[in-house]
Image: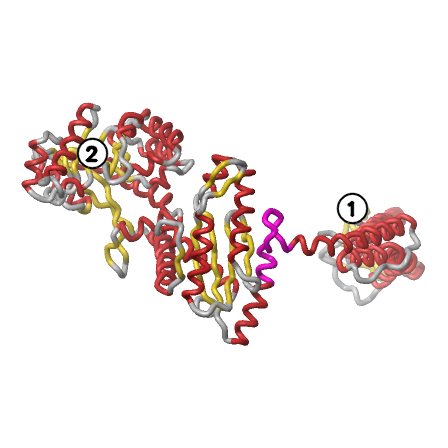
Amino acid sequence: MLTINRFLAFLFLFIVAGLYSSFAFYYLNEQETKAQIITDEFHRILGEASYQIATELEGIDSINNFKSRFNRQVAQNNLIDAMIITKEHEVLLSTNPSIKRVPHNAHVHSNMDEKKVTQLLAHEVHQITFQVYEQNNPIYLSIYLYPNHYELKGYFSQTTNTYILYTFFPTILIAALLYWVFRSRLIRPLESLRKFAYYHDIVPQALKIKELEAIRSSMVQTFQRLEEETKALYSSSRKDALSGLPNRYQLNERLTWLIAESSRADAEFAFLFVDIDNFKNINDSLGHDVGDELLINVSEIMQSEVRGYDIIARFGGDEFVMVINKYQSHLELNHIIDRVLVKLSKTQLVRQQPINVTASIGVAFYPKDGDTTQTLLKNADIAMYEAKKRGKNQVHYFTEQLNQKIISEIAMEQELKRALANHEFEMYYQPKTCVKTGKVMGVESLIRWIHPKKGIISPKEFIPIAEQTGLIIPLGNWILQQAMQDQLEWQKQYGITLPVSVNVSAIQFGHDKFFSELHDLIYRLNFEPRHLDIEVTESVLMGDTEKHLTLLKKIRGIGISISLDDFGTGYSSLAYLKTFPINTLKIDKSFLDDYRSNSGSVFIDTMVRMAENLNISVVAEGVESQEQLDYLSSIQCQCYQGYYCSKPIPKKEFIQLVHKLNV
């Protein structure tokens, strides 16, 4: 960023540079003019000498008659060192006896052009050639003029010294004086104002420039008022505006003190991270005003259950922190936490509306689970999320086993990123087989991770991590692309056209760019959409119903079929089959395992009949025996998957299997 000091320095440099540029222009012009005058004088001397010789010379033998004139000419002009007369390569006359050869490079007086100073100092000899007659025979003579370069350089150096003396030094002196004036009257006062604005410690003295003094006076008054307001705001800045509880800043201060005290006393305390369950639903359904009043009630309940030396703070949103110390045993701590959970779970009346809330609490202990605020907060947060996973409305204590689980998941995330970069994934394929004919009707693509050290890693291990970290998006895109490319390869090389099914995660399906990227991929690969089947689970249908219904219709609109995977294992509803554009229903393996029981067989038969009436295809998963296949045939199920036909296998083996079954 440009400072005033630098700006003024640049300004003065610019002014000085401009002045010097102007002076230099006139100086160079003057030097060139002088050089032109000297050059013209040399040419005049050469011209006059050649004219005298041409008109007065009686014969070559009488050339020495002109020596006295030449000597006089050289003596009278200190810029000339010598002159000679030559005939071809012979020196006929010379004012300097040491010159006995004709010079090779000489300046002809008719070709002097620009930059005369440079040429004048560069040329050692000036030449003119003329014609004389002896007995009517033309003879060409040349006169060479040798400049006195020492005198020439001194002549031009004198002008340069005069320029420097009367132009350079005065300009520098004036610029320095102006800079000092600006610095003492403008820069230093402004610097004092800047320091005062930054540190507020030393009030600058009154300034001599009226405008700057007005700024100084205004700043003094402003900072005095801000100091008074800062003191008033200090206490409020450490409290939560809604609940009146300490906020995270005061929490950090008190925890720093408590950690120091506990370290000296070798004492333990419990760090509780409290999160209200499903609080977002209350805000969304009843409004934020109701949610705010509920948070006030929650803070009052927790305050009523802690002792004076405990700490309670609102961490943000619906999250609270409780720090409990000086308890006799973990049993006493449990009693305190249980009282909080019980009181919170009681019906609360907010704006004449009864509301029931619960809370999930994670607990970490100092110093066993962490000896800093950040570590305790992280570990208590991990424990709180574990409490939510286990059903909410409960407490969970941080354990090293849980910590190792988190570390393992982080390591898995890093390895997943590396695996994506290093192309460690491979597609396996499991056939969808016709129950009656035994021929392959389609294929499901299944990803496998070929780890360089651990070997094949099951999707059950890495897909949940990919979903938690967002890596499922690039991984899912790769699966779609690879499955389509393999299907196109089978068509081109083997003449096999089989619809390929791809499992799409709920997170991937809910991504804003899922459809556009899918559409672009189909267009880029020139893939026939009717040969692609998207398999989704009921979790996709349950979340954001309107958005996902629209998306499914768009997918069906371009010709891609939709399969509902693992039907019956979740919150299965006939409304799904009625509302959503489902093409295929996949019966989960757990139902087929129970086909021998009356209830199991009735359930499977009902799903097959229902799908048939809705014009939906059925695929039974997990077929492992001939008896299961016979049962499916008896209820007229169309298609199955399972180890009885084939487990998921690499694409090369899959092609061999298709050739074998579809002969």
Work out whether residue 62 can be spotted: no
Q: Along the horizontal axis of the image, is 6 left or right of 527?
A: right
Three-letter code for the amino acid on which mark 2 is drawn: Gln
Classed neighbour count for the residue bearing mark 1: other residues with Cα under 10 Å, few (<14), some (14–19), many (≥20): few
- Magenta segment boundaries in residue numbering: 238-253
Give the alpha-carbon distance from disc 2 to disc 1, as whole Å.
Answer: 80 Å
Q: Which residue is mark 2?
A: 491
Q: Nearer the viewer, residue 633 or 394?
A: 394
Q: Is residue 264 above or below residue 621?
A: below
In this view, the mark in front (2 or 1): 2
- Colour pattern: secondary structure
Check disc 2 and report its element: helix, strand or loop.
helix
- Measured from the top left, where is residue 650 in percent x and y? 19, 47
Dominant SS of magenta comes to loop
Q: Secondary structure at mark 1?
A: loop
Q: Residues within 10 Å of mark 2 (few under 14, many from 20)?
A: few
Task: Give 223 or 76, whichever is nearer the viewer.
Answer: 223
Q: Position of residue 498 (x, y in %)?
A: 19, 33
Q: Quadrant of residue 519?
A: top left
Callouts 2 and 1 close, C-beta under 8 Å: no
Q: Nearer the viewer, residue 488 or 589?
A: 589
Relative to 414, is 224 on the left or the right?
Answer: right
Does 249 lie within the magenta span?
yes
What amino acid does circle 1 point to?
A: Glu
Q: Position of residue 67 (x, y in %)?
A: 88, 59
Residue 337 within the segment the image draws in magenta: no
Residue at 7 percent of width and 43 percent of height: 625
Whether residue 351 is visible, yes or no, is yes
Q: Which residue is mark 1?
A: 114
In the rendered view of the protein, which quadrant contains the C terminus? top left
